[in-house]
Amino acid sequence: MTPRRSSFARDRPEALDRLFHALSDRTRRRILARLTLGPARVTDLAAPFRMTLPAVSKHLRILEQARLVSRRVEGRVHRLALKGSTLREVETWLDAYRSFWSESLDAIDRDLLDHPARAPPRTRRL
Amino acid sequence: MTPRRSSFARDRPEALDRLFHALSDRTRRRILARLTLGPARVTDLAAPFRMTLPAVSKHLRILEQARLVSRRVEGRVHRLALKGSTLREVETWLDAYRSFWSESLDAIDRDLLDHPARAPPRTRRL
DNA sequence: AATATACTTAACCATTTGGTTTACTATTGG
DNA sequence: CCAATAGTAAACCAAATGGTTAAGTATATT
């Protein structure tokens, strides 16, 4: 078993993987927040951070590969801009789960109501 | 700014970090999708996957620590359930960016309109 | 032409991740 | 009591992550 498949299940980190992974780092989220104010150069984006420029450069590449930012090279300056449209993909993914938080109960609670385990079977009030 | 901080910025992976990281794995997203159908036991959740039970167990722990699933131990069975309410936190985070995709243009395009670099300054049509 | 500026690339490192196998700890059922 | 079942824990491993320093490549500036 485990048919062909070079190594593990991490062959090609599909789009959502890259997207969520890009968002899972606080530095990268701060960069995105900064970019809501408008496009910026790499040096400017790096300024607020205590890390070196190459470190920020890597973060930007990750954001770029996740399609969360776009890059325009103008001479020696790289101008980064937010690609808000990609965040809509997160929203789209979330859509499938929206009903699970617009309902007032989490699944576990619903389950409790359906099959009360040892709790008194009276209607939950309060 | 950025008060004492022992080593790097990875002291305590704050809630959003854990949340997005939990979502950045395809296996974990599939588990969440499965849980929209209702609570399930570990073995059942593991069944569709080609990995071992301990591997799934680890994924579940990550989802649990991200507060995306809740666990109820009933005898020797662990019953996992979706905690939809946590996904609302992702939605809340996304709120700050909503205007950037409801507008028809990405930031880079807006910037092009504001400060046309070398492109002809005529109104973009098409 | 020479220097400064704006970045990236490369090589390296410690830690984390996602998987494995091999124990181990409950519970449940015969 | 004994065996099967449901799951975690521990030890290990290769690969990825997030950072560093040092070097390299263009483009501006003087």
Image (spheres, coloured by chain):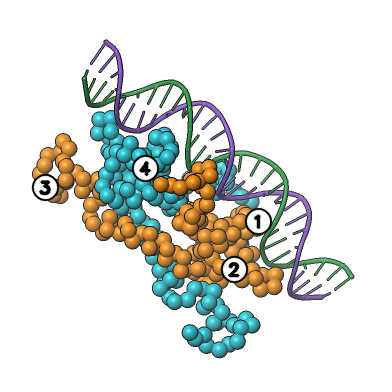
Chain colours: A cyan, B orange, C purple, D green
Which residue is nearer to you in this view: C15 or D5? C15
> What whole-number distance in Å separates the C-alpha atoms at marks 2 and 1?
16 Å
Front in this rendered view, residue B102 or B53: B102
The three-letter amino acid code for the residue at tag 2 is Arg
Mark 4 sits on what residue? A48
The amino acid type, in three-letter code, at marker 3 is Thr
Q: Residues within 10 Å of mark 3 (few under 14, many from 20)?
A: few
Name the chain under label 4: A
Q: Which residue is mark 1?
A: B54
Picture coordinates of residue D25, whole percent (x, y): 35, 23
SS type, badge 4: loop
> Separation of disc 4 and disc 1 at Cα?
41 Å
Instruction: Judge from the rendering whether residue B57 lies leftward or rightward of residue A57; answer left or right.
Output: right
Question: Label 1 marks which chain's residue?
Answer: B
Q: Residues within 10 Å of mark 1 (few under 14, many from 20)?
A: few
Q: Name the quadrant containing residue A71.
A: top left
**Mark 3 secondary-structure assignment:** loop
Camera-side mark, 3 or 2: 2
Q: Circle 3 sits on which residue? A: B123
Q: Measured from the top left, where is residue B79 in percent x and y?
A: 61, 70
**Farthest residue, direction bottom:** A122
Disc 2 designates what residue?
B71
